[in-house]
Image: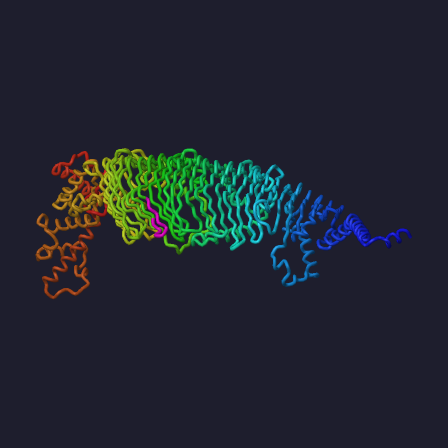
Amino acid sequence: MKVTQSWKSASWKGKTLVVLALLFVLYTLVGFFVVPGLVKDNARQALADLTGRDVTISEVRFNPLVLSAEVDGFAIADEQTEVLAGFDRLYVNFQLSSLFRWTWYFDEISVEGLTLRAQRNPESVFNFDDVIAHAQAQFAEDPAEPEPVGSDEDEGGLPSLAIATMTLTNGDLRYTEATGKEPHQLTLPVAFTVSNFSTVSKGEGQNDYAIRLEGPDGGVFDWNGHFEFSPFVANGRLQVQGVDLVSLARLGAEQVRFTVPSGELDVEAEYAFNAEPDAQLMVSKGQVVLRDLAIQNPAEETPSLLLPQVKVSGVAVDTLSQTVNIPEVLINQPHIRAILGSAGLDLATLFLPPDPDEAEERKQVVKEKAQQAAERIAEAETLWVLHLDALKVDGNRFEFVDRTLNPAQTVMLEEGVFTLKDLVVGEESPFSWEGAATVLGEGKLSHTGKGQLAPLSINTSASLTALPLAPLSPWLEREMPLRLAAGSLGLELNTAVEGESPDFTVTGDVAVDGLNLLENGSPLLKLNQTRIKGLSLSSANQQVGINEIALTGMDMLHRIDNQGRDASARIEAGTRPASGAQGSESSAPWQVGIKRVRLVGSQVRHEDLSVSPNFKIGLYQLSGVVSNLSTRPGSRASLDLNAQVDRYAPFSIKGSLSPEPLFTDMNVSLKNYEMTGLTPFTGHYLGYKVEKGQLGVETEVSIENRHLDSVTDIQADQFYLGEKVPSDEAVKAPVKLGLSVLRSRSGEITLPVKMSGDLDDPSFSVSGMILKVLTNIIVKAATAPFSVLAGLAGGENLEQITFTPGSAEVGPQTLSSLDALSKVLAEKPHLNIGLVGTTNADDRTALAAQRVGDDIDGRDWSSIDVAVQDKRLRRKLIRRYESETDKEVETLVSASLPEEEEAADAILARAAWDAMVTQEAQAVTREQLVELARLRSENAKAALVQEFEVAQARVYLNESTLDGEVSGLTLTLEK
């Protein structure tokens, strides 16, 4: 009652104070004890409904007296990372004075222990994908009401908001890459401070911020700046120092085929962003530094790429003008190691995913983008323009390892320096470069150039000296049975590349010194000095031109092995078949032209091991010129070469030739070649070694319209065969005798050889034809020597000398033949002659006629032709026949006799003569014929010795021959 009476008796002022006190107590009690629970439960439930995840809030505290709130132990659960998002403590201090400033003013907003965790799973599924999907579904079920037109925010833009201090301490960002076999996690500690944040105020001290992230291994990210609203403006400075690339690389380990054993990154830049009138971001004073970056194939012990230091300075970017300016890029002592294996070049595959299908897909994407970029660069239509003032590379080293060879081979490019200046991508602007390097330890390479990318136009000059060729031999040996044992290469080349195709031209000189090329381990080609002068190459015209190829000190060995294969056959047999796509058959062939090939002090040697003994021959002191060589149809080259065969026999070849269509007009000369070197061939084909002799050859060869004609004069001086050699291929003829027949008085053998044939005829072979002609001549000389000697006898074949049938007297005709024979013997003093007295049927008839004639008229008998004109002799002939045969003479004549008596007697007398001679011939004895043959050979020898002064020792009397082919003498040759 007293309380009630006191309340009733109190003044209104007192009552007001009490009510206010009670409201304050209630406000305080609700703020301290009711609000935290409501906020905790409602916030947790709302966030759980929104995310579809379990949400934890450990404690909520609210101080209604200072308008501050604190939330502890907030977390959104995640099965994979335990916590998707959370913090240890959130503190917000709102200032009551903001009610009088018309601005939402917070004295402090701070977050401690903020953590955000993301994880990428296979097929690029993230651990928060379900949260996003759940939230989108919630918004779709309960769409937000549209803001009423004319609201304060629309009229005033951004809400008026000010925060004295915003801080984040002990935060972290965690990213887990779980797409591969093992998960890799990156944790970045995060802290930042924003001072005097305001959406309306401008000027110094307003909206300054500082953000700091610390890497797991010491890297630091600092972001300091200032921003303003209405319009939005931001500027500041970014700095990244000592970022460990090893940790970053682990996140992408399952997306590439390399590891990063070491590497640090520094990045710093200043920036300024303006949202109006057009959004523009400008970056200035940019600098990027890479230190000790190594990219390594896990299967290798040595990094594929090692960059001790890369520094990019002064980078400037302007998004409005779409330009990037880079004053300088410095790369110090880079080391690139490329390995070629069965799967290809490793550098081309290191950045691809391990999965083959993904790798193929990425290659296709990169290829398409590269092609599009190349087209834009060629047309100077790139979206951005890049200016690179200078790129400098110092001390670079490139190592190429080819493991497709066994053993693996390495090519090194060292001590490289390179400077590129004024490169512009996206505009028509010239650039230039220069560089140098040491190749394969000894070769010195230097190069310079200038050009522009759009339209493409590049001109270069390169010089290479003393490049050793022997280290390159393994690649040659893999393709064919050849080895580069020694040699060095030098180049002085100028190259121009232009146009869309592009077309390129190359001019310059080439030098090769000390070349030593082996074939299957044996010498093939040595060149003391090779000079290619005035080289010109044009892809547009598909032409290669050379002013001169000078070969000094060439030593070529062409060897036919014991299987009959020459060098080209062995090389072809040992060459790997070509693989891969072949060139288009429809493309026009390149034309090659060489104005002059000059040979000085050279030699070409030939060995044939397929014959026994082995045949060896060589062209020494070879010199001369081959001019106007060209693959252009119809062009003709000229030759003028001189040499010494086996160092003493003069040899020359002069003329012209054309490969297409085939044309040749040449003269070949060889003098005084010692024929003992031909023993392998004379033994094989003739069956004898060469005792001595010198060979000379004069040949005229012409080929036109695929038809060959040649005239060859072969001279063999003092050519004699020696010891017999067993050979199944040797001709079966007395070849020594044949050579004696061919040999002149002075000891020379002259053989004119003519050949003619169609080169398209499969049966026609030049070498085979020459051998056949020479063999036929020798065989003919051996088997039919007198037909060969006929030329010396005025065309008369002296193998047989005729006598008058039945007579041994040397008549005028016989004497004339013996005279011709004496002249042959005079020209062939090394030949002896054998005389064979010969008789035949004519001699029997002649001897029978002599006997019948003697019976008819004794010594007065002349001939049957005279006798039939004499009536007396006609009657004797008729009576002798009738008395000896006891037959009428008319029985010998079957035809009717003339009525005139004298004519009839002449016919009967001749018939009687023929019958009696035939009968008498059968009675001629062998002794008579042998005596006749003997007398003939004796009389002939007497005539040769006495009348023609032939040495009697050179004429032999051989056994007589009866019933032979000739009535006289048959001659034989005796060596």
Say if the magenta span includes residue 541: yes
Q: How many marks?
A: 0
> With 532 as the anchor, is 869 left or right in this view?
left
> With 583 as the anchor, is 122 left or right in this view?
right
Q: Visible in this render: residue 959? A: no
User: Where's residue 942, x and y in %?
Assistant: 14, 38
Q: Quadrant of the C terminus?
A: top left
Residue 114: quadrant of the picture: top right
* Image: magenta residue range: 535-543
User: Where's residue 842, x and y in %?
Assistant: 19, 49
> Depth check: 686 or 917 in front?
686
> Depth check: 443 or 429 in front?
429
Colour option used:
rainbow
User: Where's residue 258, x and y in %?
Assistant: 57, 42
Residue 420: quadrant of the picture: top left
Q: Is residue 414 above or below residue 227?
A: above
> Depth check: 873 or 752 in front?
752
Q: Visible in this render: residue 475? A: yes
Q: Is residue 738 above or below residue 497?
A: above
User: Where's residue 752, x and y in %?
Assistant: 23, 44
- Quick one: which residue is furthest to the right in this view? 1
> Depth check: 187 or 152 in front?
152
Say if the magenta span includes residue 214: no
